[in-house]
Structure formats: structure tokens, C-alpha cells
Amino acid sequence: MKRPTILLVNCSKNRDGNCGELLSSVAEELKKLEADTERFWIGADHITGCKFCHGCMETGRCVIDDRVNTFIEKATEADGFFIAAPQTRMTSNGSIDAMLERAFRAKLDAFRLKPYALVTLARRMSEDSGANRLSATIASAEMPMIGRKYWNLTGDGRDPRELFKNKSNVRELSSMVQNLLYFVRCIDVGCDAGLIRPSRAQTAFDPLDIFGTEK
């Protein structure tokens, strides 16, 4: 069995904030479980949305050459994803949505059928709507979601260390990491056994030419 690679995705504009601290803890846990990690930070600059020009269809890269293409490159090599996203005013920042929309449209196969774990960090009620909306967006890429007993983690204040004072947070995070790695390894075992990956179905949202039909 190969050593899996998990891409840790920091969706916060503050690289060293709560999301960064959480992902560092995830990286340590994955190392103990004999898995490799790669990191991606969304960056401090704004990420613009998709232009729907379909220029990515032949290259697998977005025509807007920014961090989205870096995300696609790292995702291509990853076996699974651990995503940490901050929530403010009941939702996530627009750059997260723009990045996912463009990445999925440019190279869906870099993400499709790869499991992901999503943690949203917020203050109380902001978590629910933000987590649900992000999960729905990621599910549209046919990515299986890894669950756990409790949906979100709550980070109070600006000090990332506050996150781990809550023992429930620590337990849930460890459980989520183990669940993610279990499913990644199950997929690897299935592929080695000759299990054929299901083909992708065309939808009304896909440009016709990516299926070899008339443009």
C-alpha cells in the first residue's frame, strides 16, 4: 500500500490564524499515522470568480493565472483533502467560492471521488449555514465527505491557541483525521484489487466539448 498524501487547504486570509494552527495539528496527526501532507494557502489577495470562457477545457488550467492553478496542481497529486475555512457573518469569504468554482471547472478529475474533511471555524451560529453551503459546493465535484460526531469546531478570539483549550475540539479533530485516512486507504486498496472507477455523467452545467460531442 502506498503512502497517501493529504492536501491541507487553508482558506483563511490570515495564514497563521486559527485555520493555520488547526492544520498544523492535523499535519502532526497524519505524520503519526504514516501519511504525507502538502499545504495550500488561499492567499491574502482577492480571488476573482469564473469568467465562463471555457478556456480551461483543453489545458486543465484557468486562464486567470493565479493561486487557483497552484491549487489545481497540488490537488492533482493529492489522495484526499483536509479543508479549514473561517466563517464570518453567516458565511465564508467570496474567494473560497471563486477558487472552488474555477478549480472544479478547469480540472474536475483532480478532485472527483477523492474524500475530503471540512472544518469551519466561527462563532456560534455562523458555522451551520457556512458549513452547509461549502459542503454543497464541494459535493458538486462528486467528492465524498468525511463525517464525525460533531459538525464544526468553534474558535473564540484571535489567539489560535484558544482552539485547543476545548477538549471536545481535540477529540473531534483526531477522529476526523483518522476517518479521512481510513477512506483514502480503502480507495487505494480497491484500486489495487482492480475496482473500476465509475465514469462521469454529463450534466447541464458541463460544456458539451469535454465529452467529445459537438461544441
Image: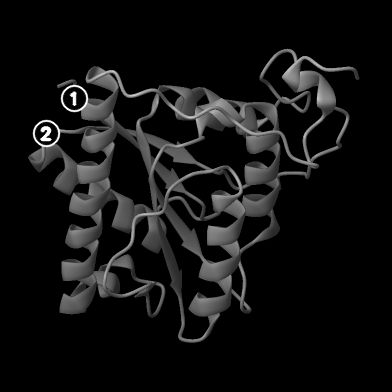
Q: Which mark is residue 34?
A: 2
Residue at image coords 71%, 44%: 47
In the rendered structure, the answer to whether residue 20 lies left or right of residue 125 reads left
Residue at image coords 63%, 78%: 89
* Residue that label 1 marks: 3
Observer able to see residue 1: yes
Q: Position of residue 66 (x, y in %)?
A: 68, 30
Q: Secondary structure at mark 1?
A: loop
Q: Earlier in the sequence, mark 1 or mark 2?
A: 1
Labelled pair 1, 2 in contact (Cβ < 8 Å): yes
In the rendered structure, the answer to whether residue 17 lies left or right of residue 133 reads left
Q: Position of residue 181 (x, y in %)?
A: 22, 43
Q: CA distance from mark 1 to mark 2?
A: 7 Å
In the displayed structure, 166 sits above or below 160; it is: below
In the displayed structure, 59 sits above or below 11; it is: above
Q: Secondary structure at mark 2?
A: loop
**Please, what is the three-letter code of the amino acid marked with disc 2?**
Glu
